Amino acid sequence: MPAGVVGHITKGIVHRAVDHWVNSSPANRAEFLAAVKRATAVDDYLTVLKRIGVSDTATAYLRDTWYNTRTGYWPRLQPIYPLLRRGLIKALEVAGDRTPLDSYWLPTAENVFIAVPICQNPWCVIRVIVTPPPTIMSEQPRTVPAPMWTVKKTAGDPLGETEESGDDLDSEVKVWRALEFPDGEVMRYSTTRAQG
């Protein structure tokens, strides 16, 4: 099973850390934005993440899976770091000094593109990283209910969702509660490639 479940939106440990840091104070946000603008290489960005408290395990996961151009996720679409970096910079610029940033990852069924939609409303700026499904197998399920739901006709995925108790509104439509990894835990992964 891939690390990100297709159609399952997730916050993830790195997004939680970045959002918490930049939303904690205007000074933190300004410092972080300036550092990301200077971080033209992946290793520079991983150093920035470590400075805000992202663990060595989490940064190694990013280096080995997201940003590894040969053996990581999406080798045909690499390098993706410049795109994701620019998306983060744009989201922070749109948010300005005080509007909260709210970031997510959404793996889709498409295998042809990676994009960073940014949505602004009066209360926050939402940044969504849209990717194909990951190509590396996860070795663990997500277990913590998250404040995110998906309404769909298809079945949920036991590693990423749990079905909420049914209702009599529509027997063909189900509500699935997203599951996340526990706080502080990063997905354990192997080099086994997902099928598909």
Image: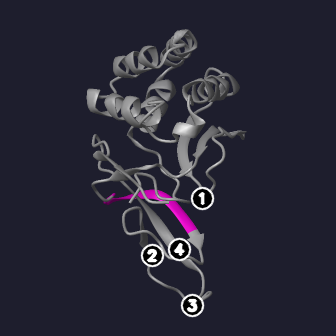
Numbered badge on residue 175 = 4
Q: Amino acid at mark 1?
A: Ala
Where residue 164 sits, quadrant-wise, is bottom left
Q: Disc 3 vs disc 2: Cβ atoms closer than 8 Å?
A: no
Kind of element beneath mark 2:
loop
Q: Is residue 89 above or below residue 155?
A: above
Q: Is residue 38 left or right of residue 110?
A: left
Residue beneath the point at 27% across and 26% down: 56
Q: Amino acid at mark 2?
A: Glu
Kind of element beneath mark 1:
loop
Instruction: Please state the horizontal and vertical placement of residue 66, each as a whole percent of the image.
Output: 46, 35
Q: Amino acid at mark 3?
A: Asp
Q: Disc 4 vs disc 1: Cβ atoms closer than 8 Å?
A: no
- In this rendering, the label closer to the viewer, 1 or 2: 1
**Does label 3 or label 1 sit earlier along the sequence?**
1
Residue beneath the point at 53% across and 19% down: 29
- Report the residue marked by disc 3: 168
**Does label 4 or label 3 sit earlier along the sequence?**
3
18 within the magenta span: no
**Does label 4 or label 1 sit earlier along the sequence?**
1
Kind of element beneath mark 3:
loop
- Report the residue marked by disc 2: 164
- Part of the protein shown in magenta: 142-150
**Does label 1 or label 2 sit earlier along the sequence?**
1
Secondary structure mostly seen in magenta is: strand
- Report the residue marked by disc 1: 109
The span from disc 4 to disc 1 (Cα, nearest Å) is 20 Å
Instruction: Please state the horizontal and vertical placement of residue 13, each as a whole percent of the image.
Output: 38, 40
Numbered badge on residue 78 = none
